[in-house]
């Protein structure tokens, strides 16, 4: 299937390069609500662009831990309204699927429940106020898996959330720990998307201090790499084959050195703990989704080659200024044809998040 897809992709690319069939890929600004809203048009047709990696905080929930939202990184992180819409209009993002980075995994049960409740209720209200522009990922108190199951069900069925945002581990516990299985079972049953956003690699803090903000620059993609590797190697993805997982930052380092995972236990069979996987590790990587926040044309081409272009969705990190030009990164990348660009810009995310591709609601 994957090979077939790549072969088809190569064929389309060939037509574009040699058949003089390069379709117009351009943009037009339109007046909407008094501001300039960039419209993204590929092959003569507007694409509903969807960003799956963008953050907010709910000030009232942060305050329960004595934190001040104005001190959090990211200008306008507490805004899910006019400012965010203006910046999305400039970037050419039609819909944001907004998540809240988990800051409550170490909290005791009552506090964690209260924070998650405030987050989910508030984010749902903010999204409902601009239903054509925002959808939400649920917060979960994952350290209490049976509570997280209830929170997930409530958030999806009652609040209209399209998925759940989770960290890279749960206060020292890996997602592959069987105690989280009920949460993954519920996510699979509901058919919703789990968005994995790393939280640094706290265990490596002494090695990541110093110049360069290495706790994030290296620590975040490493955190995702470790989380996904355990989900693969401990057999969690065999237990829940229908689980839909999307990872931030192009999946961290994992897809960029994918084949190494297929060779570890061949070289060191004594490290095999007895988990019998149904597939090669790289095949599980191609079952998951990743955002396009990898900056260069070559990194995006390689990521698509390793996991499949149909597994990639826009990630901007908005409003944290890691990448304000995600749309142009895809539009201008020479390695993809128009069909593939449309998939990455919004068609794939639309299917995952239940967002209609047309603009008739606007
Ligand atoms: Zn982020």
Image (tube, rainbow, N blue to C red):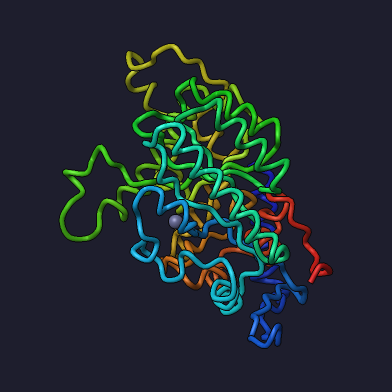
* 214 sits left or right of 267 in the view: left
- In the image, residue 26 sits, relative to residue 73, either above or below, namely below
Name the residue nearer the viewer: 95 or 77: 77
x, y percentage for residue 180? 51, 25
- Name, please, the residue furthest toward the right: 360
The image shows residue 286, relative to residue 132, as above or below, that is above
At 69% from the left edge and 50% from the top edge, which residue is drawn?
353
What residue sits 46% from the left and 51% below the top?
A: 61
Which of 302/276 is in front?
A: 276
Which of the image's four quarters has the C terminus? bottom right
Up/down of 262 relative to 23, above or below: above
Quarter holding residue 117 = top right
Residues 137 and 228: in front is: 137
Q: How many marks?
A: 0
Q: Position of residue 79 (x, y in %)?
A: 52, 68
Q: Quadrant of ligand 1?
A: bottom left
**Viewport quadrant of the N terminus:** top right
């Amino acid at each position: 299937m994957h090979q077939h897809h790549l072969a088809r992709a190569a064929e389309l690319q060939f037509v574009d390069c040699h058949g003089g069939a390069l379709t117009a890929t351009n943009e037009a600004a339109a007046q909407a609500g008094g501001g300039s809203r960039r419209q993204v048009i590929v092959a003569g047709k507007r694409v509903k662009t969807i960003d799956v990696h963008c953050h907010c905080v709910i000030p009232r929930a942060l305050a329960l831990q004595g934190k001040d939202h104005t001190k959090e990184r990211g200008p306008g992180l507490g805004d899910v309204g006019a400012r965010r819409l203006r910046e999305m209009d400039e970037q050419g993002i039609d819909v944001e699927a907004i998540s809240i980075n988990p800051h409550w995994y170490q909290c005791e049960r009552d506090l964690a429940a209260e924070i998650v409740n405030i987050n989910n209720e508030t984010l749902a209200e903010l999204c409902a106020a601009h239903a054509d522009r925002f959808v939400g990922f649920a917060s979960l108190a994952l350290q209490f898996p049976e509570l997280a199951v209830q929170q997930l069900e409530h958030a999806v069925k009652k609040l209209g959330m399209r998925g759940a945002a989770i960290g890279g581990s749960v206060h020292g516990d890996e997602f592959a720990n069987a105690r989280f299985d009920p949460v993954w079972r519920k996510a699979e049953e509901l058919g919703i998307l789990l968005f994995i956003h790393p939280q640094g690699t706290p265990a490596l803090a002494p090695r990541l201090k110093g110049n360069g903000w290495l706790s994030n620059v290296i620590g975040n993609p490493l955190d995702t790499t470790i989380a996904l590797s355990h989900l693969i190697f401990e057999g969690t993805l065999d237990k829940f084959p229908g689980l839909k997982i999307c990872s931030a930052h192009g999946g961290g380092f994992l897809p960029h050195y994918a084949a190494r995972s297929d060779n570890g236990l061949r070289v060191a069979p004594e490290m095999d703990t007895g988990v019998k996987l149904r597939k090669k590790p790289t095949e599980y990587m191609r079952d998951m989704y990743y955002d396009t926040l990898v900056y260069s044309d070559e990194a995006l081409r390689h990521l698509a080659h390793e996991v499949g272009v149909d597994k990639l969705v826009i990630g901007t990190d908005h409003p944290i200024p890691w990448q304000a030009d995600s749309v142009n990164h895809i539009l201008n990348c020479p390695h993809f044809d128009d069909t593939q660009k449309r998939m990455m810009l919004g068609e794939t995310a639309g299917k995952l998040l239940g967002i209609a591709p047309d603009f008739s609601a606007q």
